[in-house]
Structure formats: structure tokens, C-alpha cells
Amino acid sequence: MMMRPAPILTTAWRSHIICQTRSRFISLRRYTSRRSNHNELPSYIKYGFIIPMTGLTIGSVYAYYSCLDYAPYTNRKRLICTNPKWEQEMGHKQYKELLQKFKGDILPADHRASVTVQRVGSRIAAAAQSFSAQYGQTNDTTNATTSPYTYTVVRSPEANAFVIPGNHVFVLTGLFRYAHNEDDLASVLGHEMAHNLARHAGERVSESILMTILSRLVLILDPTGILFTLLVPAQQLLVALPHSREHEVEADKIGIVLASEACYDPRSAKIDFQE
Ligand SMILES: [Zn+2]
């Protein structure tokens, strides 16, 4: 019995089905391969964004806790990332520059005004020493009192007094129009020494460092600069001005403590600051 050859059409049909199945299988493999690739992020996102952002977040948290500090007496929480010794070195440098600037107007040490400032200032400085021993537990405010105090009285119509880091006290003689007695002068010097004791200068420098870092980051994230132009006035309004006010109130509080510890009448502070 002779076998009938398979019809050509049937053989062709079978080949077609096999080809179709193979191509579907290959497509499925390609599809699943594509799916698995989709689950992995492109390397430019992985290495160009996620890793730097993770590093930045960890760095920011570390920097925050490293710079976290509490102001003496008021226990106000603040960020301060400058070293007290560095602040003092900057103060000594500024002191030399100011001596140069006021050269010719500095009253001699035996002048009546200089003697008075020296006497009142020394008593306030002694009070600052005991204040630091009592309240300087959480930060390095004790370092603020290790340098010896200097007192410089400058002939000037301006009514002003200030203390720069490194314990350099400056009094401009225009102040004596308002400070009528030693109690008044003690209130002013107490307030100015309080700024120094609470390291407000270091705090302002820290703020400007943090602001510079933030500005750079904002410019990286938004190269158009729109966010940056909003950032500067926002920082002034929301950070700089409130902090400036906080510093003044804090210096008033600590200054009254210093003046009363030095046995001056702290009620003079009210009159001084009103004037
Ligand atoms: Zn002040």
C-alpha cells in the first residue's frame, strides 16, 4: 500500500505555526527583559541624583546636630558652627584694625573717662566670669572670659559702645550724653558684654555660612535663579530680623544680670534703652 504524501499546504501551515510560536516566544522574552530593565533606574538618575541627595541629607543631619547649641541663661536653641577660639582670633584682628582706624581719637588710659570705663568695665567683666561659671555648661562660653579685657575710649560725637570677641570693649564718648552715672554706663556695658558672652557674633557668622551653602544648593536645583531671588529677602524677613531682635532681648536679660551681679542698679537699663 502506497503512503499518500502530505499535502504541501499542510506542511507549509505547520511551518507557519512553528515560526509564529517561536517569534511570539522571542517577543515575550524581549518584553520581560524590557520589563526587568524598567525596574532598574537609569544610571544617570541613580548616580547623578539619588546618591548625592542621600549624602546631602546625611551631611545636613550631621551638620545640624554638630552645630546645635543652647544660649547661656535663656537656653535658646540655636545653630552655631564657628569655634570660640576662631571667633576670638577674628576679634583680636578686628581690634588691631579698630585701633588703627581710631588712631588719634583714643583717649589716654589716665583720662577721667577711660578710668571710669575701666573701673565699671572691670566689675562687669568679673560678673561675666561668675556668669560663665554658672551658665556656660552647654557651650564654650567659658572661653569668652579667658582673654583679658581691654578698654578703649574714643573721642567721637557718636553715642555708642560695643564689645568684640576677644573681650575688647570700645566706648565712644558721645555715649556720655546719655549715660549720666556709673549705673547707666554699667547697664550699657552689661548689654554689650552679654552679646559677647552669648557669642552672638559667632551665631551671625554661622547664619551667613549656612545661607551661602543654601544659596548654592538652590542655584543647583533651580539654575534660572528665580528661587534664589526669593530666598534672599525671605531669609532677611524670616531669619535675620527675628534673630537680631532675639539677640537684643537676650543681651538685655543677661546684661541686667551682669550689672546687678556687679552691684550696679539694674533699673538704669530701662532708662538707657528708652533713650
Ligand atoms: Zn545690642
Image (cartoon, helix red, strand yellow):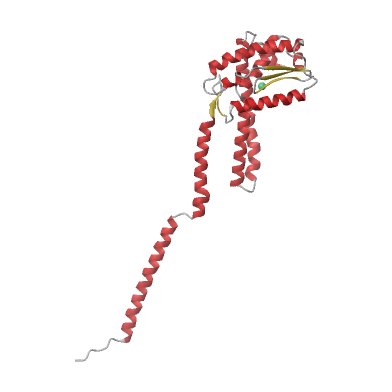
Most extreme residue toward the left, as rendered? Answer: 1
Tell me residue 32's x, y (percent).
39, 62
Q: Give the side of residue 126 with respect to residue 40, left or right.
A: right
Report if residue 257 is visible in the image.
no
Q: Residue at x 64, y 11 (%)?
A: 123
Q: Give the side of residue 42 with respect to residue 155, left or right.
A: left
Tell me residue 274's x, y (percent).
70, 16
Height in image: 6 above or below 237?
below
Q: Quadrant of the N terminus?
A: bottom left
Q: Nearer the viewer, residue 2 or 126?
A: 126
Height in image: 176 above or below 80?
above
Tell me residue 254's x, y (percent).
60, 17
Name the quadrant where ligand 1 sits. top right
Q: Quadrant of the C terminus?
A: top right
Q: Quadrant of residue 231?
A: top right
Most extreme residue toward the bottom, as rendered? Answer: 1
Q: Residue at x 73, y 26 (%)?
A: 97
